[in-house]
């Protein structure tokens, strides 16, 4: 019995036919057929019933295929573990809106500890960051998500939480809303609202507005600098998180004012935003990735 034979059995069960399995594995049909026949002779039992309708696994074939899948999972886990131990780089895909200060503090600290570590940073939309980590195109993703959205993430993702913030309305210090202690959705009815152009964000916020029958003029942009220029000039208001209060120069200078968003008809946690680091659940974290996440959480606790 060989690993290759087991792989062939599992592939035929998954794909339904020897021909389909051969196409999937990029090997010849006779190679798979010959390997399975030899395994059946060694085990002394039929693994597949071959008929004109196709190749159907027997009970023994199902058992061997299930065992083969478990062995393959263990081998993949071992390979990823060995790769993780030897890994000397981290690739990050980040949604830059509000996450930048946490990322920069963390990068600075890990560079001091591990000066030879390579760090590759890419900025993308919230939706694309999540999908890219799910597809294992990046090691880690850093995003801010409403608490309710965390429950909707794919089980393929491992979620490392490091901070909670609240939704706030951002506007010019000269805007009529700037003098209010808090803002409710109905207060936005008479003003132009600019939102970050991302499906998850737009769906959540427009749903919130529709709940209160707020039909405000909407502008969408994936340029954070442009959004803040619109706010500073008083041409629109937007929705961010309270994290901006500690990091954004325009907020700290007073040019942009942040006002808490309040909605008595909603549970409080629906207005909470969670900053998280995402990784692929079935892939063991490399040493440097663990350190990176630990620093992210530690620095947050020190703030």
Image (cartoon, helix red, strand yellow):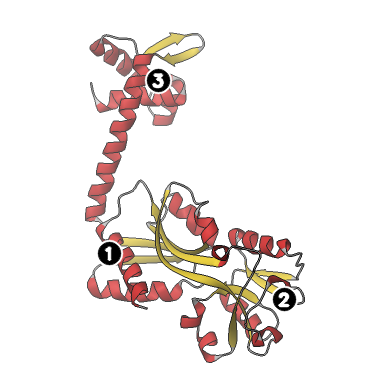
Q: What residue is drawn where x is 54% and y is 85%?
A: 251
Which mark is first along the chain, 3 or 1? 3
Image location (x, y in percent) of residue 21: 42, 25
Q: Say the numbered circle drawn on residue 291.
A: 1
Cα distance between the residues tagged 1 and 3: 47 Å
- Please report the residue visible at 77 percent of the width from the left and 67 percent of the height from the top: 215
Q: Please say if 112 is above or below 27.
A: below
Kindly indicate whether the residue at mark 3 contacts the one at mark 1 (C-beta within 8 angstroms): no
For mark 2, what is the residue? 187
Along the viewing direction, whichever of 94 and 24 lies nearer the viewer: 94
Label 1, label 2: how far apart the Cα atoms are: 44 Å
Pick the residue in front: 110 or 209. Answer: 209
> Where is residue 16 drawn, in percent x and y?
46, 22
Q: In which quarter of the image is residue 48?
A: top left
Q: Is residue 33 visible?
A: no
Left or right: 241 as drawn, with respect to 300: right
- Are discs 1 and 2 less than 8 Å apart at CB? no
Q: Earlier in the sequence, mark 1 or mark 2?
A: 2
Q: Quick one: SS at disc 1?
A: helix
Q: Quadrant of the C terminus?
A: bottom left
Q: Name the residue under label 3.
A: 29
* Quarter of the image where the N terminus is located: top left
Look at the image and tell me whether residue 174 can be seen.
yes
Residue 94 percent across, percent down from the top left: 46, 65
Residue at image point 31% right, 26% down = 67
**Secondary structure of residue under mark 2:** helix
């Amino acid at each position: 019995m060989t690993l290759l034979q087991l792989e062939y059995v599992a592939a035929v069960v998954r794909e339904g036919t020897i021909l389909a399995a051969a196409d999937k594995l990029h090997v010849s049909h006779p190679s798979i057929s010959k390997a399975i026949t030899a395994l059946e002779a060694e085990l002394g039992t039929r693994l597949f019933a071959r008929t004109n309708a196709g190749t159907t696994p027997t009970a023994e074939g199902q058992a061997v295929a299930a065992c083969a899948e478990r062995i393959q999972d263990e081998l993949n886990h071992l390979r990823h573990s060995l790769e993780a131990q030897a890994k000397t780089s981290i690739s990050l895909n980040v949604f830059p809106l509000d996450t930048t200060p946490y990322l920069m503090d963390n990068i600075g600290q890990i560079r001091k500890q591990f000066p030879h570590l390579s760090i590759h940073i890419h900025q993308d939309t919230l939706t694309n960051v999540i999908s890219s980590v799910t597809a294992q195109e990046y090691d880690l993703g850093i995003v801010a998500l409403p608490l309710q959205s965390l429950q909707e993430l794919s089980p393929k993702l491992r979620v490392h939480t490091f901070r909670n913030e609240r939704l706030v309305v951002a506007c010019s210090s000269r805007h009529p809303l700037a003098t209010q202690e808090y803002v409710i959705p109905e207060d936005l009815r008479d003003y132009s609202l600019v939102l970050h152009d991302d499906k998850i964000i737009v769906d959540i916020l427009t749903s919130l507005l529709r709940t209160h029958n707020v039909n405000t003029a909407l502008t969408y942009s994936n340029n954070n600098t442009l959004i803040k220029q619109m706010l500073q000039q008083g041409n629109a208001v937007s929705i961010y998180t309270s994290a901006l209060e500690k990091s954004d120069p325009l907020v700290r200078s007073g040019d942009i004012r942040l006002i808490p968003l309040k909605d008595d008809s909603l549970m409080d946690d629906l207005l909470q935003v969670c900053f998280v680091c995402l990784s692929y659940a079935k892939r063991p974290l490399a040493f440097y990735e663990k350190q990176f996440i630990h620093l992210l959480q530690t620095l947050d606790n020190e703030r």
